[in-house]
Amino acid sequence: MGTLVDGRAVAAGVMEGLAVRVQRLHDRGCVPQLAFVLIGESGPARVYAGRLERLATTVGIDVSRLQLPADVTVSGLERQVGALNADWAVDGILVQMPLPPHLVGAHLSSVIDPHKDVDGITVSNAGKLYLGLPGHPPSTARAILEIIDFAGIEIAGQHAIVIGRSNVVGHPVAELLLNRHATVTITHRRTRDLFCLCRQADVLVVAAGAPGLITPDALKSGVVIVDAGINVTEHGVVGDVDPRCVEVASVMTPVPGGVGPVTNAVLLVGVVESAETRDA
Ligand code: NAD
């Protein structure tokens, strides 16, 4: 029987470290600020902004909200983001995702200042990740590494299998694992014999958005499992990994209460890192 990692405890540790760093910034007259760009009436984006705002204020990070009308144009959105880029008091910029359909043509991946791109969506930060240079990786990918480190797992030399290749989770987490000298296999919807591959994993990161995709028969005994899946079902929020997998794993993250809380905390780490550079 493996251990369930409490993501809230991991997040609390991250926030404790952040509080000290933010205090040092305050002492020098610098208040880190995260700016949210919200478009129209999107309820989920507001809920997310509110949650991050409550967390940020516990350590002294300011959160501002720029509310744009639902009919804002691509150039209007890009102009507003440009103004936040130019605002020296803003350290991080988060634009509501997914964008409404009429804004998908906005070039946010090249418009947001990479230094303020705390969720790693820009081409510049993706390139830095690929080259193993310091930058802002997507926060969920960063949270997954934070959890593995918290659990005391040595990554170098392990066979890590990542299920999912999206730009926000699967692909970047594979790069982070590779940068830490894991042997990485990326799998996706078209992968053949997924379970056969999974049984070779020392570390299994699942980010597919497919409830219960991974069952105990897909696992090697003692595997470390990080489940990034968030699926809203009639039984509540569930992950991509069947909870019974903990009986075969050595370490596993639950859903909810695993990767999610850590993602919010490490996103704020990115804001503080930017502020520390601003203040230097
Ligand atoms: P996505 O839909 O963009 O990508 C899913 C990936 O999984 C794709 O590469 C797809 O090929 C692969 N996949 C899907 N079904 C599969 C299957 N049956 N077998 C093998 N591969 C399969 O999704 P995403 O944005 O990467 O999100 C993935 C999951 O992570 C979702 O549940 C999402 O809600 C969750 N998520 C969690 C956080 C967090 O903070 N915990 C953040 C972002 C996303």
Image (cartoon, rainbow, N blue to C red):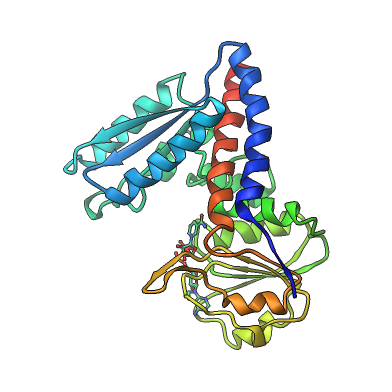
Outermost residue, left direction? 71
**Residue 232 placement, left or right of 243:** left
In the displayed structure, would residue 51 be above or below residue 144?
Answer: above
Image quarter hosting the C terminus: top right
Which of these two is toward me, 178 or 61? Answer: 61
In the displayed structure, would residue 28 be above or below residue 271?
Answer: above
Image quarter hosting the N terminus: bottom right
**Image quadrant of residue 176?**
bottom right
* Visible residue check, residue 138: no
Q: Whole-percent x and y of residue 202?
A: 76, 72
Q: Whole-percent x and y of residue 250?
A: 76, 71
**Residue 148 placement, left or right of 48:** right
Q: How many marks?
A: 0
* Visible residue check, residue 229: yes
**Residue 136 placement, left or right of 73:** right
In the displayed structure, would residue 10 be above or below residue 184?
Answer: above
Which of these two is toward me, 175 or 253? Answer: 253
Q: Residue at x 72, y 79 (%)?
A: 248
**Residue 65 placement, left or right of 16:** left
Q: Residue at x 54, y 67 (%)?
A: 207
Q: Whole-percent x and y of residue 274?
A: 57, 29
In the displayed structure, would residue 179 be above or below residue 83?
Answer: below
Q: Whole-percent x and y of residue 273?
A: 61, 31
